[in-house]
């Protein structure tokens, strides 16, 4: 039985971030990744440049595009343009490259990577957590980081995370070539997707197109939507590699830690319930989890409750307002577009949210009030 300080289940953005910081602090860390190869992941890849503050190494080598302008539309017409503040406020990355890059940094800092290693059993064994793989291999550690994404079975099994999980229905398309997408510009399309929106993010040699529906529990007819969107972007209506996925999104404050165990990233249901931003909370939670675990492992704290409290303060409070905005906006999307997107000050506020400069709490009361007054 091999003992470690920390086992990290999942070598994605959140898990590899936690592994890097824990290894850098001198702890024995092993990343457990179920996939043997670096798969293309169904993720738009957009993240605020503010994520750089959580890393001592430069992330720019894996940034495909720096976004300085966001173009909004309603049913592919009625455009609104938002100029993003700062020199590099919003970045586009390919998720598989980001994950591999941070994992490599974790390995360089001393972490180990085991793959394929699919965890099928997780149990408390005295002072340790024991994990068992699909092929019967076992490891033990003082602590475990749950970082295996929206499909993770462990939050429910451990009684952590939201009491009721909520999912967004998503379709992602990876396209070769740029079509008519201009450099430094991303697209958000409202009106074609029931209870959601579509987006298009440019890459070095391609485009990521996504569709997401955020309230209710019904799947979306992604093919009919893509038949309208893709030609508008300069592509064939049936172009690209498509992936459907359920994305676990924020659904209320909840405990994210137990005795020597924490949830991070999508496994912790941290994805933005309004704009589907998942990378910033993934990287933030990986960093915050490492800080909390380090203090616990060296005996400076009795438990990991400060992790849950930190995520609630730094992310969850804003998401509580983001959920309220989403519930009103996506039920009355045309009204929402007219007074929430086309309002003169709205592009600046959306740009500030995308760049991480403000949270939903800074605008929520005014936005919700306007939406309800307009419907009255």
Image (spheres, helix red, strand yellow):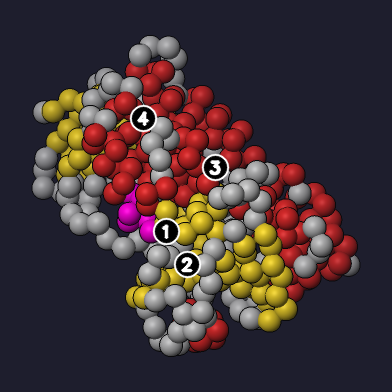
Mark 4 or mark 3: whose residue is earlier in sequence = 4
x and y percentages locating residue 303 in the rendered image: 44, 20
The reply to whether callout 2 and callout 1 are in contact (CB within 8 Å) is yes
Nearest the viewer among 13 and 89 is 89
Residue density around tag 1, few if under 14, some if 14–19, many if 20 or more, within 10 Å: some
Q: Is residue 244 visible?
A: no
Give the number of the mark in front: 3 or 1. Answer: 1
Residue at 47% x, 59% y is: 65
In the displayed structure image, the side of residue 369 where residue 23 appears, left or right: left
The reply to whether callout 4 and callout 2 are in contact (CB within 8 Å) is no
Q: Which residues are magenta?
A: 94-99
**Numbered label attached to residue 50:** 3
**Numbered label attached to residue 21:** 4
| In the rendered image, the vertical position of residue 300 relative to residue 304, given as above or below | above
Residue density around tag 3, few if under 14, some if 14–19, many if 20 or more, within 10 Å: some
Residue at 54% x, 42% y is: 50
x and y percentages locating residue 251 in the rendered image: 57, 49
Determine whether the residue tagged by mark 4 lies in a helix, strand or loop.
helix
Determine whether the residue tagged by mark 3 lies in a helix, strand or loop.
helix
Which of the image's four quarters has the N terminus? top left
């Amino acid at each position: 039985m091999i003992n470690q300080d920390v086992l990290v289940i999942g070598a994605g953005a959140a898990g590899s971030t936690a592994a890097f910081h824990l290894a850098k602090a001198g702890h024995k860390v092993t990343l457990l990744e179920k996939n043997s190869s670096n798969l293309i992941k169904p993720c738009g890849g957009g993240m605020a440049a503010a994520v750089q503050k959580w890393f001592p190494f430069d992330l720019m080598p894996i940034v495909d595009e720096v976004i300085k302008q966001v173009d909004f539309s309603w049913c592919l017409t009625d455009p609104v343009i938002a100029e993003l503040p700062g020199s590099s406020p919003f970045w586009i990355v390919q998720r598989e490259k980001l994950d591999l890059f941070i994992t490599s940094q974790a390995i360089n800092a001393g972490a180990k990577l085991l793959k394929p290693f699919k965890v099928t059993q997780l149990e408390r064994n005295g002072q340790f957590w024991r994990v068992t793989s699909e092929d019967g291999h076992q490891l033990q550690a003082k602590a475990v980081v749950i970082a295996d994404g929206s499909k993770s079975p462990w939050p429910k099994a451990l009684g952590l995370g939201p009491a009721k999980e909520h999912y967004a229905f998503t379709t992602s398309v990876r396209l070769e070539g740029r079509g008519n997408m201009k450099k430094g510009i991303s697209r958000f399309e409202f009106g074609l997707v029931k209870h959601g929106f579509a987006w298009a993010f440019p890459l070095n040699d391609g485009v990521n197109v996504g569709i997401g529906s955020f309230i209710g529990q019904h799947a979306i007819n992604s093919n009919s939507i893509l038949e309208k969107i893709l030609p508008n972007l300069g592509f064939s209506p049936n172009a690209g590699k498509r992936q459907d996925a359920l994305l676990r999104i924020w659904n209320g404050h909840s405990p994210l830690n137990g005795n020597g165990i924490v949830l991070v990233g999508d496994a912790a249901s941290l994805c933005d319930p309004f704009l589907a931003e998942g990378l910033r909370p993934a990287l933030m939670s990986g960093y915050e989890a490492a800080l909390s675990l380090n203090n616990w492992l060296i005996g400076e704290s009795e438990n990991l409750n400060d992790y849950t409290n930190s995520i609630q303060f730094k992310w969850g409070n804003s998401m509580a307002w983001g959920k309220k905005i989403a519930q009103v906006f996506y039920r009355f999307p045309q009204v929402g577009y007219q007074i929430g997107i086309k309002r003169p000050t709205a592009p600046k506020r959306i740009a500030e949210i995308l760049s991480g400069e403000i949270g939903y709490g800074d605008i929520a009361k005014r936005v919700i009030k306007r939406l309800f007054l307009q419907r009255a």
